[in-house]
Amino acid sequence: HHGNAVINDPDGIRFALDSASKIVGKEHAILDTRAHLGGEDFSNYMIRVPGVYLFAGNANDENRGKWGLHSSDFVLQESNIPRMAAVFSQIAVDFFEKGGFR
C-alpha cells in the first residue's frame, strides 16, 4: 500500500515558524526545505485539512548525526518535551486567535 505525500500548506509553514519563534527564538525555528522520503500517515489528515508537519530538534553535541528516530540507540532528550509542548500550544493559540493560518 502506498500512502500520500506530506505536503505542507505554504501559509501554514510561515504561520508555524512565526508561532514557534515566539517560544524557541527565530534562530531555532528553522525551515527545512529538503525533501524527505520517510512515510508518514499524517498525509492522510492533510488531504482533508491544510496542515504543517514539524520536526522537533533532539540533537545535542553528544548525539548529533549519530542516530535516527527509529534507531534502537535513539535517546529522547526529555528536556525538549516541555519546550515542544509550548510550541504546539502556541501554534494552537495563535491559530484560534487569528482564525486560521492567514
Image (spheres, rainbow, N blue to C red):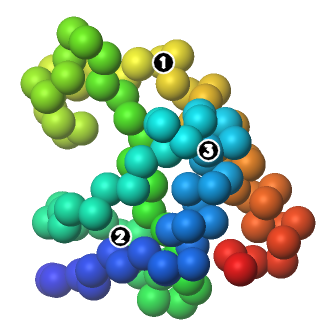
Q: Which residue, given by chain and number where applicable, does mark 3 sit on?
A: 21
Residue 96 lies in quadrant: bottom right
Decide: is 74 above or below 88. above
Query: Residue at 83% across / 77% down in the picture?
Result: 99
Disc nearer the start of the sequence (2/1): 2
Q: Percent from the top left, x then y, of residue 20?
A: 61, 47
Which tag is nearer the camera, tag 1 or tag 3? 3
**Residue 41: mark:** 2
* Label 1: element kind: loop
Q: Residue at x 44, y 55 (%)?
A: 54
Is 21 rendered above or below residue 10?
A: above
**In the image, what residue occupies the spot 17% across and 36% down?**
68
**Residue lying furthest front in this view?**
27
Q: Which residue is mark 1?
A: 78
Q: Is residue 45 left or right of residue 43?
A: right
Q: Earlier in the sequence, mark 1 or mark 3?
A: 3
Q: Which is closer to the viewer, label 3 or label 2?
A: 3
Number of numbered discs: 3
Three-letter residue code for mark 2? Asp
Q: Amino acid at mark 3?
A: Ser
As measured in the structure, the alpha-carbon distance from the residue carrying label 3 to the one carrying label 2 is 26 Å
Query: Disc 2 vs disc 1: Cβ atoms closer than 8 Å?
Result: no
Residue at 19%, 67% in the rendered image: 35
Dot 3 or dot 2: first in sequence order is: 3
Residue 85 visible in this rendered orientation of the protein:
no
Going by the numbered disc 1, the residue's amino acid type is Glu
81 on left or right of 23: left
